[in-house]
Image: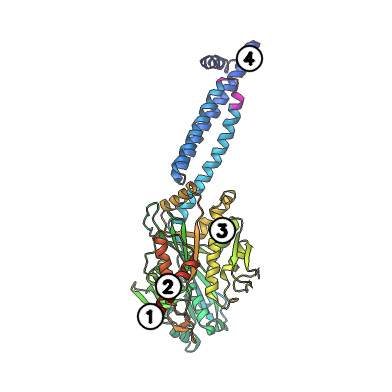
Amino acid sequence: MSGFFTRTNRDMKYIFKSSSKLNKKQLKRKKRGISSLIGILLVIVELIISILFTYEIIKLNIFPLKYLAMFIIVIILLLLYNFTSQFTKSRGIGKFLSILVSMLLVFGYLVGSKVNWTLQGITSNITKTDSIHLVVLKEDTASSIADTLNYTYGYNSQHDGDLPVKAIDKINQENNSSLNVKTYENWEQITNALYENNDIQLIAINSNIYKTLLEEDEDFGGKTRILDTITITTKVAIEKGEVKQKDDCFIMYISGNDDYGTISDTGRSDVNILAVINPETRQVMLISTPRDYYINISRPDSSGKIITGLDKLTHAGNAGTKYSMEALSNLFGVDVDYFFKVNFDGCVNIIDALGGITVFSDVDFINGTDAAPERYHFVKGANECDGAKALAFVREREAFAAGDLQRGKNQQAAISAMIEKATSPAILTNYSAILDAVSDMMYTNMPTESIQQLIKDQLSDATPWNVQSYSLTFMPEVNYIKPLHVYGGTGWACLPDYDSVNMAIKLIQKTQNDEIFNVDEVIQEIENLENSDNTSVTN
């Protein structure tokens, strides 16, 4: 080898000499020298790219140590071979390998950078966009905000906080106006002021509360219309959860927001699932709670005072994700460690990026247009779904006699299908589209380190996860119309079946206690035991 180094060194002396002054042998040496120099430059480029790639992979922190060591060893060996080959007759192979390795490393570096960027994006502070609807009577002749500058605006100071104030201030600034404003403490007062007393001619209302009013008050939708919408954009700081030890069990609240577009921290949650995840046993327990569960929820009023009372679970999200977490935490008597929030657009985009999912339906049904613009036929059993079809599957409830209960089961089935697809090798073929879908349509307070650890564990141990699900039920009632103590008025709500709540608590505890089980078998065992106890007492 030393002879090759010496010869190459001599060959390179001819590189910068004029070809016209060299003989045939010297010209040959010059060509060899140029070839070796090009090869060395290629290896230097490969070295730089290798360093960048290695740095990005170490920073990504998702590969087990054995894989990381293997990557580094292979990179070093290839570098050594490609470098030394430039001083032998194999310099052509070395050049080819150097170019090929550099291209692969550049690709790996870009993938690593994108994954790092996505992880930071879904765990960092988010930009929250609130929409304030300007609502007038349907027969009102106003066609723009300019037509309402002499109107008296009204808003609910107790339920909407300071958002209407910000919207009104924005209107005043943009139109150099000074609007007349009246405040009210409940929706009955404010709607009467608009409908009957003519004390106000326009209501400024948060879009999330507007949806609730449409749902709970049939007259509101028939008597009013949205004149315009003001958007208020603010930064929301995500309070990170604690980093868990590698094999510690944790509970994540999965929230499905009933909005489209950019993800927001506030808004009614149609999907309310607690995922109890035990990395050591690979057991996942999904507990679904109906959106209209009539339980204690909380919200801050305009002064920051916390108001607590019986209301619908879905309304808790109007004050922010942490209030939904708090409501479920109190219901089950557990600490909820993290949340994971996705809106409807996110659901569609992620499933499409995964290449579709296979959901298993308990029943045969066709969704209505409230669930999706297109009507799909779902058969009992396996159904191949793209994003739009999967969204119809998880949103439909009117087609079922069980209503929200069946919808909860469908949501669990879709999540199970997404977990199965996301933990399969198929995810690698669509990584870029998946990362793009994830980055804008979801966010979480789970620390980046914890997400990285989960990915690392999956790469080091391909043991399938045992995903089980359970849906809470509610009590049969003659009258489902209940007073809504936190957000005011009355609305359709369902009383919890606390037998099912207690069953869910037992399933959570079994998962936390490192037990591996099948839900149906556990339920049957508990019911048999209770029946046996009842028989003993009777005798």
Real-space CA distance between mark 2 and mark 4, rounded to the nearest whole angstrom: 94 Å
Q: Name the residue under label 4.
A: 27
- How far separated are the C-alphas under marks 3 and 4? 60 Å
- In front: 120, or 153? 120
Quadrant placement of the C terminus = bottom left
Circle on res. 529 = 2
Q: Is residue 419 depicted above or below 205 in this figure?
A: above
State the residue at coordinates (56%, 41%). Answer: 107
Colour pattern: rainbow
Closer to the eye: label 2 or 3: 2
Residue type at mark 1 is Val
Cα gap from disc 2 to disc 3, whole angstroms: 43 Å
Q: x%, y% of residue 427?
A: 57, 51
Quadrant of res 375: bottom right
Foreground: disc 2 or disc 4: 2
Looking at this view, name the residue that lies furthest to the front. 539
Q: Where is residue 16 in the image (x, y as percent from the top left)?
A: 57, 18
Q: Residue at x 46, y 47 (%)?
A: 62
Residue ID for mark 3: 350
Q: Which class describes the residues within 10 Å of circle 3: few (<14), some (14-19), or many (20+)?
A: many
* Residue 58 colored in magenta in the image: no
Rendered image quadrant of residue 373: bottom right
Position of residue 160 measured from the top left corner of the image (x, y, whole percent): 42, 74
Separation of disc 3 and disc 1 at Cα? 53 Å
Earlier in the chain: of badge 3 and badge 1, it is 3
Q: In this view, does 163 lie above or below 185?
A: above
Disc number placed over residue 143 in the picture, else none: none
Query: Disc number at residue 537?
Result: 1
- Label tally: 4
Q: Is mark 2 on a helix, strand or loop?
A: helix
